Amino acid sequence: MSNPSSSWVAQFNPGDRVEIRPRDVGFRGSWYAGTVVHREAKNTNRYVVEYDQLYADESGEKLLQETLDWVQLRPPPPPPEKKVQFKFEDEVEAFYSDGWWEGAIIAEHSGGKFAVFIRGFDEQIVLEEKDLRLPVQWVKGKWEPRFEQVQREKENSNFSKEVMKFTQGMQVEVLTDEDGLKGAWFAATIIEPSGEDKYLIEYKTLRNDDDTEFLREVIRACNIRPCPPEIIVVDGFKVWDAVDSYYNEGWWVGVIAKVLINSNYEVNFIEYDEKTTFNQADLRPHQDWLNGKWVVP
């Protein structure tokens, strides 16, 4: 990580077309199309935006407007430079319920269709190729195709369609679907397999309702990953760095919003529209587990 000598902040103008990270917990992991209405006030980095397909009430007569931080906005991603050959286990964004949702391809069907596991809904749905796109990141005003290199490696190698198998006693991290904890990774131990592509795990920090023992749950394999390798951060983080923050016994994905003194940082939890201050000791660079490899965005 480089020294945070300068900070880049996105600038938007009224009328700009954008994609929006809704702040409601039920929309975690999604992007929705909308338009910038105006900046909240001069010298601020918050904007009033209006959604294309989300409404202020059940009547559907008035489009929803929200005031959001700049890190929850981005321009619409450009189309891919070449046709994408989607395959089993690809991380994708799927157009579902009027927005683009994070997911993974869990099966290939005939006719150019794919079974996709939508994490925000904990559902499996079948979609056409036109309703899928590879995830990209908008970093410092530029689009970065996070998974392009992985995609090329898959196309040029004998890619295995085997789902990763976990063994008894293996130390892992688990993505839970429990309300209030969605989006966080928690340390756990594999106890035993429990059906097809599912495992009984025991959390290391979460306890049962009686607080008598550590909580055990059956978790889908797609929501389990090995513990990420340690990355030593020498020169500190900078604004816009993607990080995991240790909070409420788990690791939560966020973005550095402000560099403070004494190795402290203000982190924006994008999914929840919340900002919290952390010391560097409670932060780690964000990594994604993709196709059996750790990838740094």
Image (cartoon, helix red, strand yellow):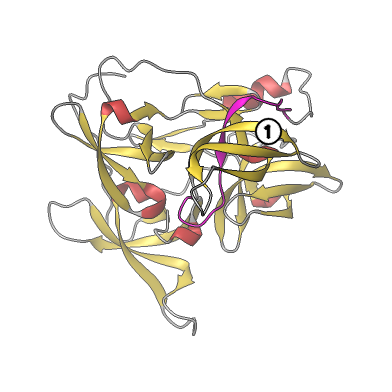
Depth check, front residue: 146 or 229: 229
* Amino acid marked by disc 1: Ile
Task: Quadrant for residue 1, please give it.
Answer: top left
Residue 143: image location, x then y, percent? 44, 35
For the point 44% across and 80% down, the residue is 57
**Number of marks drawn:** 1
* Residue 14 visible in the snapshot: no
Residue 134: image location, x then y, percent? 59, 39
Q: Residue furthest front?
A: 212
* Residue 280 visible in the snapshot: yes
Task: Quadrant for residue 167, please give it.
Answer: top right
Depth check, front residue: 165 or 20: 165
**From which residue to which does the magenta span run?**
164-181
Give above or below for 235 relative to 189. above
Give above or below for 11 relative to 63. above
Q: Residues within 10 Å of mark 1 (few under 14, many from 20)?
A: some
Q: Residue furthest right?
A: 110
Residue 92: image location, x then y, percent? 62, 42
Residue 29 is left or right of residue 118, and the answer is left
Secondary structure under badge 1?
A: strand
Residue 237 is left or right of residue 88, and the answer is left
Residue 211 is left or right of residue 244, and the answer is right
For the point 48% across and 54% down, the residue is 28
Examine the structure image and report whether residue 119 is included in the region drawn in magenta: no
Residue 218: image location, x then y, percent? 68, 45
Give the residue number, with chain letter if any, for mark 1: 191
For the point 46% across and 28% down, the residue is 297
Depth check, front residue: 68 or 63: 68
Give above or below for 244 relative to 24. above
Examine the structure image and report whether residue 171 is included in the region drawn in magenta: yes
